[in-house]
């Protein structure tokens, strides 16, 4: 996609989007509801025309090509199975329109139903199936056509957690088997992290970051990404030269990240909750950077304990302490205790303030990240 | 307590059942009995199991029966032909005019059936612009006319029963899941193919309801033939009306009504059994 | 979904049928017609409260706006005047069951045409009148209407208004139509209408062929019906009509019709090309008659009303409005002073000369069953 913008009246649903998805990739678009994921997908599928910009598939501009002529297939958010046809007819629908010989259609439909494990239900109607089964039919109906790109719009959104987990695995497996490019839309960051080769995190019609799951998780590009992917521990900081930052009300910390910013610039320092250690100020390791705070609450989560620590008026930090032993857990500081949080400098990462969150901030860093992608 | 609770569903059914008995079963019984009687107003009517009332009146008025079904069939066909695109436009293209357009469809109901039909006499009279136009495009011969012909009766039936076609069609189309149409397009079906493969089969219940609601009253109608038809264009409804009101031959009138009903019922059952249910299932030719 | 749809459609179909059937049935009625009835024990209408209330059923546009009010003021009788007679047959269908059970539906006076009056009387639905209570009617009824064939002694009927059935033509489009037979001239093919009422249409056709309607046999009737059928089948006759014949004439779709004089007078005031033409072989004269049905609650008030409208001054008021032939003596004299145009209109006050060939409306010979047979033959042509 090149500079794609989509407006509905005055409202900009997708703005200036540049995206390059590789062949055979499992690509995920992640973002909160209403951020323009579906709209983006629909522009690729041909149900919407971009207001400006180009959509290229295999190097050809598909502008003006109607949906039924594009080499894409969609697994719809609501499945959109044809209620008046059997599974077999549903799955064979696309091949029939493409005038594939009957014998071949029969063979491919049977194979596809086999793949999704619904061979026995071939003669049933969609309303006689469970939600998970319908989902698999929708997948089979799209996959059987061997599209260049398969578009999936929150395909697991309507299913319960357990079913979703199982299907995530299956879906990933199938994608590896068929080697088709998947463009997968979801608002569930866990789903995105487990399945994707690459993730584009979207917010208010823009891409905030586009990278592989590890990078997105460990090195979020913006405060928004950091917030959306798991729990955010954001400490306001100021860049001090090319390899050091000053955490507000905290220590001076060396970091190579600072090189991306100019001196005196404001940014945020992020440390993942599980990378923080908590100790009483007197026992704290002196060789690690740290901040002081007061424990507000402590929550037992089974394998770990989640603690909320207030550092300043508006900075809250979350800490995950593994429950190594019953004894260690008993000795954790309780509510109201003064504690120090420490981390290793390499576990700290700088993020720019999100453009959309505070429009005044310099947008350059965000933009850089977007363009830097593939 | 439990017994009372178990009876509740029947109590809820009661009004419907009473309605059915009062307005369907009892009159049906009386009419069935009457249709087998002989006699006259002065002598009274005696039940003589006069099945000849049926055989005679059917053979005597087969022309009007056939004509009624023919006119009603053609009118229903035109209603569908006009009604489907109309309902489609209202459901999908009308935007904020939707309610206004729906209102326009039912607006004729605000005047009496009779007045509406008589208004068509003006629309179709020999010197009306409509007829002049039809003459210039040679659809009607120069010395021909529209009023007092079969065409006028069919036009009147089509006009009068069009709302009965449009409303169920509109409901069916409105209920149609738009995403299914996108799914069709996504699966390489062109707009035409999407219509025939998806829209049409999925709106089949509306089409069937529309056809029934149009055809059944149209087949029994006599108003349009009375006012818009000429001679030799009477429908079976006109015969029943004249038998009942003018000749006071009540048994024959009852026998004819019963026959009309029976024919419609049988045709209906056949229609639903064969055309109807299959179309409903939207059976594609087998994929095998 | 699909299966339940089939069921739903089936249910819908049944419901629709049920509705259709019940409508037909409600229209056709069920009981009440099993008992035969006759007039062997006709009662004479008596009793009632001369100060009570009165209920009249009459045809639309058949009275002016003031007469009823004046009558109420003069007599103190609270009067309900309903225009619910649109068609003799339809009205008969509406009230027949009630009347058969001796219930007039609260009506004290109904107004129907001669033949329908006779039919109702023969079925025992109508009471005889007590002539002693009708002095004004006795005094002022015009001689020509005093002994019609259906009720020679005016035992049970009092004329309301009369009229003629003849030709109504567009004099600009069909100036040469003078006789009923001119309707069958091929140059007017498809531009001619006849009336759906057999007793209006058939006798005129017979008379045109030299048959005296009063002497006509059943065969004469059937021959005339055959002649009509021929002209239906060859497209000569456009359609059969009720009152609506005037609209077809006004538009020019029809150039000549069998029609009623009163409608012609009214239509002429809108379109002067419409004209009543007395057929060369004569017209048919009919009356609509006031009758007291069985079970009428207040005959005393009914008599009062009949006498009231037979006062020439009161009648003149009605005649000015309805433009039919008045059955009351002395009306013309009053109108000559008030409105000479009406007084000199041959359709409202026909001269002897104008009606010299006319005959009182006739029915086919024989009893009700024989008449029905002829009626059926005629209806088979109308609803062919
Ligand atoms: N057809 C449309 N007309 C107007 N606004 C639309 C339309 N489709 C989507 N939008 C708006 O665009 C925004 C993005 O929608 P969408 O792409 O569906 O979000 P997502 O799939 O990420 O939840 C939403 O605010 C939505 O209201
Ligand atoms: Mg969405």
Image (tube, coloured by chain):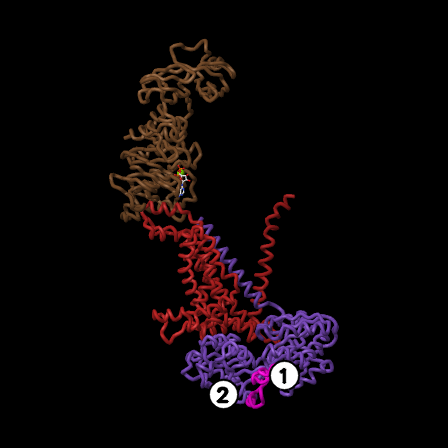
Judge depth for marks 1 and 2 and give the one in front.
1
Name the quarter showing ligand 1: top left
Q: Is residue A155 left or right of residue C293?
A: left
Q: Secondary structure at mark 2?
A: helix
Same chain for mark 1 and mark 2? The answer is yes
User: How many numbered badges does the structure rendering display?
Assistant: 2
The part of the chain drawn in magenta is C335-363
Magenta stretch holds residue C188: no
Residue C337: mark? 1
The chain identifier of the residue carrying mark 1 reads C
Residue sitting farthest toward the left: A59
> Which badge, 1 or 2, comes first in the chain's sequence?
2
User: Which quarter of the picture shows residue B127?
Assistant: bottom left
Q: Residue at x 55, y 75 (%)?
A: B246
Residue corresponding to mark 2? C208
Residue nearer the viewer, B8 or C66 = C66
Chain ID for purple: C
Secondary structure predominantly adopted by residues drawn in magenta: loop
Q: Quadrant of residue C266?
A: bottom right
Q: Is residue C362 magenta?
A: yes
**Which chain did the renderer colour red?**
B
> Tell me, what hue is chain A?
brown
Which disc, if any, is residue B189?
Answer: none
Q: Residues within 10 Å of mark 2 (few under 14, many from 20)?
A: many
Q: Chain of mark 2?
A: C
């Amino acid at each position: 996609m090149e500079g794609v913008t989509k407006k509905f009246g005055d409202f900009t649903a997708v703005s200036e989007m540049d995206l390059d998805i590789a062949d055979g990739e499992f690509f995920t678009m992640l973002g909160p509801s209403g951020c323009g994921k579906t709209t983006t997908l629909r522009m690729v599928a041909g149900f919407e025309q971009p207001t400006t910009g180009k959509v290229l598939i295999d190097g050809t501009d598909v502008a003006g090509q109607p949906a039924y002529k594009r080499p894409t297939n969609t697994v719809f958010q609501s499945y959109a199975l044809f209620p008046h046809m059997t599974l077999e007819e549903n799955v064979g629908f696309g091949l029939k329109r493409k005038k594939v010989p009957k014998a071949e259609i029969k063979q491919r439909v049977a194979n596809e139903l086999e793949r999704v494990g619904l061979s026995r239900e071939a003669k049933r109607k969609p309303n006689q199936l469970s939600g998970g089964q319908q989902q698999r039919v929708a997948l089979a109906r799209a996959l059987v056509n061997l599209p260049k790109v398969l578009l999936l719009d929150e395909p697991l959104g309507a299913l319960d957690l357990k079913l979703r987990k199982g299907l995530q695995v299956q879906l990933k497996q199938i994608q590896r088997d068929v080697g088709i490019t998947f463009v997968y839309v979801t608002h569930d960051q866990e789903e995105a992290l487990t399945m994707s080769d690459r993730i584009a995190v979207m917010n208010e019609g823009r891409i905030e970051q586009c990278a592989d799951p590890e990078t997105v998780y460990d090195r979020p590009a913006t405060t928004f990404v950091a917030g959306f992917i798991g729990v955010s521990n954001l400490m306001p900081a100021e860049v001090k030269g090319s390899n050091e930052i000053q955490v507000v009300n905290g220590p001076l910390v060396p970091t190579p990240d600072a090189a991306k910013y100019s001196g005196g610039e404001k940014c945020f320092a992020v440390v993942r909750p599980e990378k923080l250690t908590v100790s009483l100020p007197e026992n704290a390791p002196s060789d690690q950077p740290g901040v002081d705070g007061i424990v507000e609450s402590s929550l037992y989560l089974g394998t770990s304990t989640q603690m909320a620590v207030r550092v300043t008026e508006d900075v809250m930090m979350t800490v995950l302490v593994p429950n190594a032993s019953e004894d260690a857990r008993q000795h954790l500081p309780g509510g109201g205790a003064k504690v120090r949080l420490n981390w290793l400098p390499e576990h700290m990462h700088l993020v720019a303030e999100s453009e959309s969150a505070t429009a005044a901030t310099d947008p350059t860093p965000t933009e850089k990240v977007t363009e830097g992608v593939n | 307590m439990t017994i009372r609770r178990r009876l509740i569903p029947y109590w809820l059914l009661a009004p419907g059942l009473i309605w059915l008995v009062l307005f369907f079963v009892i009159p049906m019984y009386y009419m069935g009995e009457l249709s087998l009687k002989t006699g006259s107003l002065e002598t009274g009517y005696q039940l003589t199991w006069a099945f000849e009332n049926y055989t005679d009146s059917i053979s005597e008025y087969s022309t009007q029966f056939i004509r009624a079904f023919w006119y009603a069939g053609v009118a229903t066909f035109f209603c569908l032909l006009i009604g489907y695109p109309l309902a489609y436009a209202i459901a999908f293209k009308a935007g904020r005019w939707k309610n206004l357009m729906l209102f326009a469809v039912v607006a004729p109901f605000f005047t009496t059936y009779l007045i509406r039909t008589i208004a068509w006499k003006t629309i179709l009279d020999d010197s009306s612009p409509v007829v002049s136009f039809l003459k210039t495009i040679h659809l009607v011969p120069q010395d021909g006319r529209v009023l007092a012909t079969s065409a006028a009766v069919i036009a009147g039936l089509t006009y009068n029963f069009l709302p009965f076609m449009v409303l169920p069609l509109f409901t069916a189309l409105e209920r149609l899941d738009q995403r299914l149409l996108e799914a069709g397009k996504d699966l390489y079906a062109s707009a035409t193919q999407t219509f025939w493969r998806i829209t049409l089969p999925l709106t089949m219940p509306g089409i069937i309801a529309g056809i029934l609601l149009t055809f059944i009253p149209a087949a029994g109608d006599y108003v349009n033939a009375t006012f818009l038809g000429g001679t030799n264009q009477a429908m079976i409804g006109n015969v029943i009306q004249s038998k009942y009101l003018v000749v006071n031959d009540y048994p024959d009138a009852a026998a004819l009504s019963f026959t009309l009903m029976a024919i419609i019922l049988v045709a209906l059952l056949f229609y639903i059994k064969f055309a109807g249910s299959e179309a409903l299932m939207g059976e594609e030719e087998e994929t095998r | 979904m699909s299966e339940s749809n089939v069921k739903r459609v089936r249910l819908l179909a049944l419901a629709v049928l049920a509705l259709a059937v019940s409508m037909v049935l409600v229209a056709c009625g069920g009981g009440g017609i099993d008992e035969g009835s006759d007039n062997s024990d006709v009662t004479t209408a008596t009793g009632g409260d001369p100060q009570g209330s009165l209920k009249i059923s009459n045809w639309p546009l058949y009275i002016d706006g003031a007469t009823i009010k004046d009558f109420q003021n003069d007599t103190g009788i609270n009067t309900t005047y309903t225009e619910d007679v649109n068609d003799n047959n339809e009205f008969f269908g509406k009230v027949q069951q009630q009347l058969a059970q001796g219930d007039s539906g609260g009506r004290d006076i109904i107004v129907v045409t001669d033949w329908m009056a006779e039919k109702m009387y023969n079925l025992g639905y109508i009471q005889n009148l007590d002539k002693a209570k009708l002095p004004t009617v006795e005094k002022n009824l015009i001689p020509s209407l005093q002994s019609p064939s259906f009720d020679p002694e005016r035992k049970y009927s009092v004329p309301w208004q009369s009229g003629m059935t003849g030709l109504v033509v567009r004099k600009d489009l069909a100036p040469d139509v003078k006789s009923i037979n001119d309707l069958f001239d091929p140059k007017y093919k498809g531009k001619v209408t006849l009336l759906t009422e057999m007793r209006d249409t058939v006798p005129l056709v017979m008379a045109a062929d030299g048959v005296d309607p009063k002497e006509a046999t059943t065969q004469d009737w059937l021959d005339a019906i055959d002649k009509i059928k021929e002209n239906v089948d060859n497209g000569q006759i456009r359609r059969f009509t009720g009152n609506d014949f005037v609209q077809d004439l006004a538009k020019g779709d029809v150039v000549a019709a069998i029609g009623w004089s009163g409608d012609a007078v009214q239509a002429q005031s809108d379109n002067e090309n419409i004209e009543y033409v007395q057929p060369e072989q004569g017209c048919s004269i009919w009356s609509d008659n006031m009758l007291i049905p069985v079970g009428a609650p207040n005959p005393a008030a009914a008599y009062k009303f009949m006498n009231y409208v037979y006062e020439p001054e009161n009648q003149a008021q009605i005649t000015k409005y309805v433009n039919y032939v008045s059955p009351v003596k002395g009306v013309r004299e009053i109108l000559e002073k008030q409105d000479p145009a009406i007084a000199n209109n041959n359709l409202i006050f026909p001269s002897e000369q104008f009606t010299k060939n006319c005959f009182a409306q006739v029915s086919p010979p024989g009893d009700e069953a024989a008449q029905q047979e002829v009626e059926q033959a005629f209806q088979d042509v109308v609803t062919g």
